[in-house]
Image: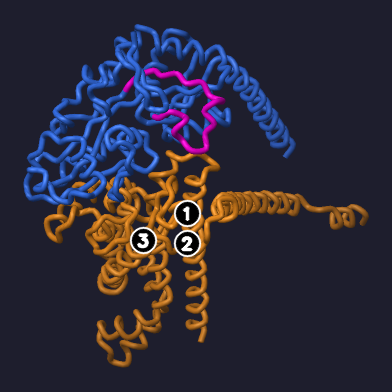
């Protein structure tokens, strides 16, 4: 009797193992959270120093158009206007998303609705291959092929937002495609069956039912692609020309937050205004990716509600 | 169950011992036998090659060389994180660096030449014209006697040593107009080579037949002209150390300055030996003749 009682009260081996597993996974989680927190803290502490230590006006930083932190601008303050980079980053992100979306959705529809077998056999491996190509390769092809093409077709020096858009379009296409395909696959089978049963053609089913039902998922895919485009540094840096000027057309050299960051960070001294200003750019990037994440979560939650109804 | 416990314990002990051993060993090599040099990418090939030669002659000694840019080199040496900070520019010229706390060792000289796309049809510019081109006062090569092509400026990144040198000695301290920027000499050259009307500047070691090298005021950018300061656009390559560097650092710098390295490696890699210079330049830009 006592033996049974003891064995019931004592923790079993399975419990112990379970607790150990729990602690292990919890500590992994804690470590990752700590790392994220430290990155935020570090970027914020350096990025905010521009405004608190060097007393740069936040509005001036966001709206100024002169960028040369080592020198004094026309208004007597250090020239740290980040507007050209912010505008460049946003334009290139939005344009590449606009160009990539129709292609991505078309491919996804083909892969999931029109020819699922060929889609799974050929298209999926190809898109996955595209994801795996390093960005420096995209940048190099952009430099050797896209830039001369843009120069000969549209004029200018070839470096600028247009070239960057073309390169980024190819880079984000696989991400948006495969996520859109997942979204289309997630549309319940009975939606399609019901539509076909009502006498709709395949195209009507795709257009009126499947695509409509998959909108939240596809929006998530697009925002995901935009987040990637916004953060891409190397490939864009090679084709955009890196001139801290407000772009007055699509073929004039421009710059993005990331391209100025990667170019400048090695030539500045930690703690100086030049360095702090670059950290402020990094902070903007971080906040933007945070915003993209929030948008994705928001869309995801909305989408779930729709399907439950 | 018991067996696995024993194995676990053994494993733990092994890992612990391994880490402990590694740690003590690491501390040992760090203080005795290795130094780290960080900074300028223009100087990196020379320090790397010299470091390799030095290691092969002195077994057990390691010279770690990393890039990162002149600014990184200077800030790392100022904070004492590395033994040597490589820089293209004088510490006095960099904001945020207290040059008085550092010891300057000039180990080589680099000449910088303006390069231009071949289609432009220009081979010589006066200094005044060069300044007009880079400050954006002249917009088309036609105005300078070339073909009807718009001028496309390709600058190096802000804060780059090459750009600072070019602005100080070719543009007489004037800032270049805002334009395209590239973060490496190789990329700048290939872009000038492929873009009609493009103009930039690179170190002598990057000059080749894909671009036209410009004369300035009729002076050809050659090593001999740099030695006598007839070609004005050049800079020292600096190894900065603390005021009191450790033994190995001292020995390594002496080695780089020795005839063996200066006569062979420095020339092979396209730099100009400091021993050959007929003039000396101070941080203020003042030139004196070497007797």
Q: Nearer the viewer, mark 2 or mark 3?
A: 2
User: Mark 2 and mark 3: span between their CA atoms?
Assistant: 36 Å
Which residue, given by chain and number where applicable, does mark 1 sit on?
A77
Name the image quarter holding residue A230: bottom left
Chain hosting mark 1? A
Q: Are marks 2 and 3 on the same chain?
A: yes
Residue sitting at 27 percent across and 86 percent down? A204
Element type at marker 3? helix
Picture quadrant where residue A52 is located: bottom right
| Mark before the other along the chain sequence, 1 or 3 | 1
Chain letter for orange?
A
Q: Position of residue A265 (x, y in %)?
A: 44, 43
Residue A148 vertical position relative to residue B291 in the rendered view, above or below: below
Residue A175 is tagged as 3
Q: Which chain is blue?
A: B
* Residue, far right: A2
Q: Is residue A133 left or right of residue B283?
A: left
Q: Residue furthest bottom?
A: A198
Task: Say whether disc 2 or disc 1 marks the residue closer to the N-terminus.
Answer: 2
* Residue assigned mark 2: A60
Q: CA distance from mark 1 to mark 3?
A: 43 Å
- Please provide the residue range marked out in magenta: B89-109
The chain letter under disc 3 is A
**Does residue A229 appear in this view?**
no
Q: Are marks 2 and 1 in contact (CB under 8 Å)?
A: yes
Q: Position of residue A72 (x, y in %)?
A: 43, 50
Instruction: Depth check: give the residue in front, A161 or A82.
Output: A82
Looking at the image, is B117 positioned above or below residue B273? below
Give the percent coordinates (x, y) of residue A43: 55, 51
* Quadrant location of the N terminus of chain A in the rendered image: bottom right
């Amino acid at each position: 009797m006592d033996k049974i009682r003891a064995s019931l009260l004592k923790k079993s081996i399975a419990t112990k193992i379970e607790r150990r597993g729990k602690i292990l996974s919890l500590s992994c989680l804690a470590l990752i959270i700590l790392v994220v927190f430290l990155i935020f803290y570090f970027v914020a502490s350096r990025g905010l120093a521009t405004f608190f230590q060097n007393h740069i006006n936040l509005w001036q930083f966001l709206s100024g158009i002169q960028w040369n932190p080592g020198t004094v601008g026309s208004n007597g303050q250090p020239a740290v206007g980040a507007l050209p980079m912010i505008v460049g980053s946003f334009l290139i992100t939005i344009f590449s998303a606009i160009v990539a979306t129709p292609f991505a959705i078309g491919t996804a529809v083909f892969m999931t609705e029109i020819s699922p077998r060929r889609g799974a056999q050929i298209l999926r491996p190809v898109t996955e291959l595209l994801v795996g190509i390093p960005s420096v390769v995209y940048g190099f092809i952009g430099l050797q092929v896209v830039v001369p093409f843009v120069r000969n077709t549209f004029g200018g020096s070839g470096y600028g937002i247009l070239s960057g858009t073309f390169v980024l379009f190819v880079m984000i296409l696989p991400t948006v495609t495969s996520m859109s395909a997942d979204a289309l696959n997630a549309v319940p089978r009975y939606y399609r069956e019901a539509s076909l049963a009502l006498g709709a053609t395949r195209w009507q089913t795709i257009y009126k039912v499947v695509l409509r039902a998959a909108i939240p998922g596809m929006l998530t895919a697009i925002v995901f692609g935009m987040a990637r485009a916004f953060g891409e540094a190397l490939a864009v840096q090679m084709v955009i020309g890196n001139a801290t000027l407000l772009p007055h057309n699509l073929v004039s050299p421009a710059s993005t937050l990331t391209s100025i960051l990667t170019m400048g960070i090695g030539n500045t001294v930690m703690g100086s205004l030049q360095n702090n200003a670059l950290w402020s750019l990094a902070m903007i990037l971080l906040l933007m990716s945070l915003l993209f994440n929030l948008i994705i979560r928001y869309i995801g939650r909305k989408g779930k509600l729709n399907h439950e109804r | 169950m018991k067996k696995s416990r024993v194995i676990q314990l053994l494993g733990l002990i092994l890992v612990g011992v391994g880490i402990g051993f590694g740690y003590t060993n690491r501390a040992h090599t760090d203080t005795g036998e290795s130094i780290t040099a960080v900074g300028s990418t223009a100087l990196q090939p020379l320090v790397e090659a010299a470091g390799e030669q030095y290691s092969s002659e002195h077994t057990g000694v390691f010279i770690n060389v990393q890039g990162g840019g002149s600014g990184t080199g200077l800030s790392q040496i100022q904070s004492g994180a590395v033994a040597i900070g490589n820089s293209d520019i004088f510490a006095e010229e960099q904001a945020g660096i207290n040059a008085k706390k550092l010891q300057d060792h000039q180990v080589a000289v680099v000449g910088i030449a303006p390069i231009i796309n071949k289609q432009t049809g220009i081979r010589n510019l006066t200094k005044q014209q060069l300044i007009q081109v880079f400050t954006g006062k002249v917009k088309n090569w036609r105005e300078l006697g070339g073909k009807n092509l718009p001028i496309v400026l390709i600058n190096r990144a802000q804060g780059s040593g090459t750009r600072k040198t070019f602005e100080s000695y070719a543009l007489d301290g004037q800032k270049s107009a805002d334009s395209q920027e590239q973060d490496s000499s190789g990329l700048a050259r290939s872009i000038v080579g492929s873009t009609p009307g493009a103009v930039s500047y690179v170190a002598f070691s990057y000059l080749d037949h894909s671009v036209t090298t410009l004369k300035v005021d009729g002076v050809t950018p050659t090593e001999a002209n740099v030695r006598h300061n007839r070609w004005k656009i050049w800079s020292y390559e600096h190894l900065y150390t603390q005021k009191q560097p450790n033994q190995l650092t001292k020995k390594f710098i002496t080695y780089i300055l020795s005839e063996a390295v200066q006569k062979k490696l420095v020339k092979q890699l396209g730099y100009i030996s400091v021993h050959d210079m007929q003039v000396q330049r101070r941080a203020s830009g003042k030139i004196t003749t070497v007797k």
